[in-house]
Amino acid sequence: MTSLQPENVSFTFSTEFDYEYRRVFQNISLEATHPELGSIASLSAIKIWRRFCRGSFLEIMDANSDELHQFSVKLFDNFGRVRPWLLEPGNRCGTGCWGTELNDGEIIYVLNISVVKEVRGKGLGSTMLKELVSSEHVDDRDTLMCWPTPTEFTDKSNWKFLQDKQIAFLRKNGFRRVGRTQFLAYSPNPNHLSRFIPANDDADEQGREFDPSAIDNLSAEEVKQNYPIHFAVVNTHGQEVIDTIRRHYQSDPACIHNPDASGFTPIHAALGRANLNAVQVLLELDVTEDLKNAKNIEGTTPLESLTSAMQSSREFLGIFMGQWDGYTQDDLTCEFLVKRVMGMPLISNNLEEYIAKRRWGCTCGECAGGWLSKHMRFRLCCAAGMATDGMSFEMESFQRGVPCNGVDMMDNVMCYLPLTLQQSLFKTFYVGYQSIFDAIYNFLERTDEPLSKNVILMRTLGERGVSFFFSKGGQIKYAFDAITHSSDKQSPLGDSSFEETWENDDQFMDLPTCSNDLEFSLWGPYDVFDEDDVMDDDDDNDDNDDDNDEGDLVG
């Protein structure tokens, strides 16, 4: 057989941008060829530019493939930010070697490494990875990720054997598990914490000791017979589930603590489904110790299971159904009851108030309307103030009775007007537009109330130029769009320039943190008031001549 000398092997890269999402995905192929043996190895990967997803990361990953869908929802949110539970100390963070650096750089997702049988065991697979890492396609801030999954259809024991070989190969090449998920990652940065964890000390995948097929292969009747409380919790509600639990408890008090084949106890199943009736009766029968139990296939406590289900529902409804109406009352009541039993901090000790505060995801207890956090308010306020000041400099661009082309203006708010309004602007219209921004700034600066079109409308009626602005097609939403998009772009979801500006400002840095701090989509759409109801008469008499001139020019 021809010997395989490294110097005789050539490596060739080829790339192709995705047809549908050219700015997000780049397919990378690497082929190893030998002058006598021909093609002897190949590697395929996808480079993912998260910054071009702009809040649609999960949706775009789902559109690519089921594998990227599972990868993305497991590790990241819809902005491509790593899931918080991977960063927090606990059962699911594994070795803790991966942190917020996973939010930076690009992702190179390795799909497959294949070496022909005749030359296996000679280090060619490792060489392929090194070639990829040292290529122009990978930067020190990037992260390589992989899901070791044998594609051969073999029996269960052999499949596991092959997967263990793949994991050992990746670990030998510096990959370490992300938390206790099925995914492994590699950092090109030689100083990354993962580089200092020996392969033998890497975390195992959560739940490998459990066999999900033990339940999956059962019929509904068999599940009902073997796990009657679990079956009732998942399939019944109201008095029926209450009676079922009490009946089995009277026969065997220990049954409310018995796990199923995946390690889930009845309270875990009840919270995973937010079955309020089941949760209430189980808490009444005292399953307090079970609330701490994370010995299951997912490695989650019952409360973590509820939190995960709530987040998944939120993402599904918001991304794929187009509308999320907040967490349900049953979700939040279950959460409240369990946190109270566990002695955990509550944003309110009153259930009704707790639900009102938490409905839109608030975790600080101080969000206006349950959604507008202090940090978000500060960002939007600054954006509105900057817009107001910037527009003042543009006022000198106008001449009496002569329209300006807003497309050529230097301020950053004109692009949020429809093009038909931008192309022929008179000063009165522009003054009205500025008054909207000024009203937003003053409202956010001087009150703690939630922002809405209605309150801004009430504050601008009678202001110079505002009625004319509305009568010619202007809308408050244009100003809302401007401050929202500007704040978004300058946030950590964009270029982080806002943080760089305000990182030493105590007023900003001392504000309470909240899960809603970067949820720019929470308050849009903001169509809670129809501006068509505004009267068309302009109360401003200073520019009457301009107004008359503008009547036929601004649509």
Image (cartoon, rainbow, N blue to C red):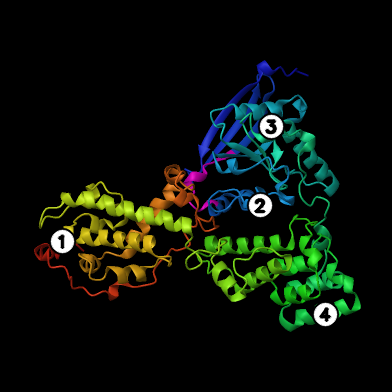
Which of the pair 58/286 is nearer the observer?
286
Give residue 300's quadrant in the image.
bottom right
Image location (x, y in percent) of residue 26: 53, 39
- Image position of 330 with respect to 547: above or below: below
What amino acid type is highlighted by mark number 3? Arg
Q: Is residue 179 visible?
A: yes
Q: Label 3: few (<14), some or many (≥20) within 10 Å?
A: some
Q: Which mark is residue 246?
A: 4
Image location (x, y in percent) of residue 66: 63, 52
Mark 4 vs 3, N-terminal side: 3
Q: Which mark is residue 124?
A: none
Give residue 363's quadrant in the image.
bottom right
In front: label 1 or label 4: 4
What amino acid type is highlighted by mark number 1? Leu
Cα separation, mark 4 vs mark 3, equals 53 Å
- Tell me the SS state at disc 1: loop
User: Mark 1 touching mark 3, by CB under 8 A?
Assistant: no
| Residue 55 forms part of the magenta stretch | yes
What amino acid type is highlighted by mark number 4? Arg
User: Mark 3 touching mark 2, by CB under 8 A?
Assistant: no
Residue at (73, 42) in percent of width and height:
95
Q: Going by the image, does 374 lie left or right of 140?
A: left
Image location (x, y in percent) of residue 307: 65, 62
Cα separation, mark 1 vs mark 3, equals 66 Å
User: Mark 4 touching mark 3, by CB under 8 A?
Assistant: no
Mark 2 vs 1, N-terminal side: 2
Mark 1 vs 3, N-terminal side: 3
- Mark 1 = which residue? 553
Name, please, the residue furthest toward the front: 506
Which region of the structure is painted magenta? 46-57
Q: Is residue 20 visible?
A: no
Cα separation, mark 3 vs mark 2, equals 22 Å
